[in-house]
Image (cartoon, rainbow, N blue to C red):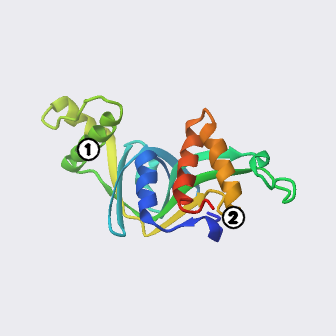
Amino acid sequence: MYLPRAFVETDLTALDALIDAHPFVTLISTDADGAPFASHLPVLYRRDGDAVLIEGHWARPNPQARHTSDILMIVHGPDAYVSPGVYPDKEEAARVPTWNYAVAHLHGRLDVHEDEAALGDLVDRLSRRFEARVGRDWHFEMDRDDHREQLRGIVGFRFAPTRIALKFKLNQNHPAVNRRAVREDLAARDDAGAQAVARLMRSSDAGDDR
């Protein structure tokens, strides 16, 4: 990922918040011939200090479950178009359109597992996590034969990334007056992504409105 210095984020609490809000990730690997392959998956995340652990599963027929390459996991945060017409200095600085966004790239190797108890625990935790987000209460029941049989159709993974890159492109290369104008424009849009970017900008610029 192209990562200009102005847009580098090093605080892992930013990753915590990003993946909490956007837990549906892209997982990229290469097959035996070196061809890239991508899957799109919900994941569970936890962090202890600098140690990150991410868990998920594939459908068993997914060939990625048998790839042995290094992988790239992409966490897609919010994004929004920024019009040059928003900038107060648009004419004198000859401003051009851009896009603000937040994204994380995590690199490393996967630990693949097929143990029934571990898969049951994973599915139970996934369902509890995401059912709660939508106000529902379905949960996996390991003591039910029909639930347990479903585990035969999946392969689980654990991922402890060895390298994490966070890119928060939020107009940090602009003067404060421009950033404030962009924040206000994005916050006023009837668009959840734009409003989420505005909130990130507000957090990033806290104390910098002079």
* Residue denoted by label 1: 125
Instruction: Determine which of the numbered discs, if any, sits on residue 109 in the image.
Output: none
Name the residue rendered at 22%, 46% in the picture: 121
Residue 163 image point, x, y percent = 47, 69
Earlier-in-chain disc, 1 versus 2: 1
Q: How crowded is mark 2: few (under 14 residues within 10 Å), some or many (20 or more)?
A: few
Q: Residue at x 86, y 57 (%)?
A: 94
**Neighbour tally class for label 1: few under 14, some 14-19, many 20 plus, Cα within 10 Å:** some
Q: Please, what is the three-letter code of the amino acid marked with disc 1?
A: Arg
> Residue 162 vs residue 46: left or right?
right
Q: Is residue 174 left or right of residue 61?
A: right
Residue 10 lies, with reference to residue 55, above or below; the image says below
Of circles 1 and 2, which is in front?
Answer: 2
- Give yes or no for contact between labels 1 and 2 (Cβ–Cβ under 8 Å): no
Number of residue marks: 2
Residue nearest the observer in this picture, 109 or 205: 205
Residue 173: mark in rendering: 2
Calculate the distance from the C-alpha at mark 1 to the C-alpha at mark 2: 41 Å
* Residue 112 in picture, x, y percent from top left: 34, 56
Location of residue 93 in the rendering, given as x and y in whole percent from the top left corner:
84, 60
In the depicted structure, whether residue 40 falls above or below residue 163: above
Query: Residue 151, located in which quarter of the rendered image?
Result: top left
Q: Nearer the viewer, residue 177 or 48?
A: 177
Q: Position of residue 156 (x, y in %)?
A: 32, 50
Q: Which amino acid does label 2 sit on?
A: Asn
Query: Which SS class for mark 1?
Result: helix
